[in-house]
Amino acid sequence: MNLLNKYRKGNQNKMLGWMKLMCFLFVVQALTFSFNTWVQFQYFKRDFNVKIELKAHKTNLNTAGKCELMDLSGIGESTANKIIEGRRDKPYETVGEIYERGYIGSKVFNNIKNNLEI
């Protein structure tokens, strides 16, 4: 009976050691996963903030070049050229003048009017 109890006690200690090791490895893995997730979120948040700042930039109708005008949604090369030619005769006084002069349609104007300035 003594030998049996001693054998059980030895196996229990071994099992307890393995359980401690497994718990330790689980905690390390959980912390590593949490840290990696936090780091990825910080990079995502930084990239998201940069994109918001880039979106906030407004295009000036009286000073923008052809490439800058073409970056606006719905403005192609020919429309950009028309806008540039139109400001040579008389600079724009309001954002709505590009629509009033017939360079763009109402749908395109409604999409880009918040990105324009004088």
Image: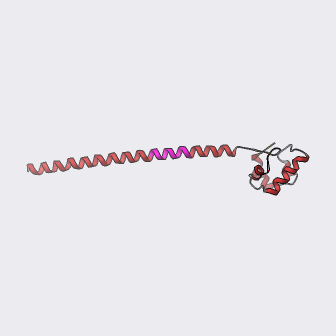
Residue 36: x and y in percent read: 47, 46
The answer to whether residue 10 shows anywhere in this view is yes
Residue 88: x and y in percent read: 89, 47
Q: Toward the viewer: 52 or 82?
A: 82
Q: Toward the viewer: 106 or 76?
A: 76
- Assess whether residue 91 is covered by the magenta stretch: no
Q: Image point 49% across, 44% down: which residue? A: 38
Q: Image point 23% across, 50% down: which residue? A: 15
Q: Image point 56% across, 46% down: which residue? A: 44
Residue farthest to the left?
1
Residue 49: x and y in percent read: 62, 43
- Assess whether residue 41 is covered by the magenta stretch: yes
Residue 28: x and y in percent read: 38, 45
Q: How many marks?
A: 0
The answer to whether residue 105 shows anywhere in this view is no
Q: How is the image coloured?
A: secondary structure
Q: Is residue 8 left or right of residue 80?
A: left
Q: Image point 68% across, 45% down: which residue? A: 54
Which stretch appears magenta?
34-43
Q: Toward the viewer: 106 or 17?
A: 17
The majority secondary structure of the magenta stretch comes to: helix
Q: Quadrant of the C terminus?
A: top right
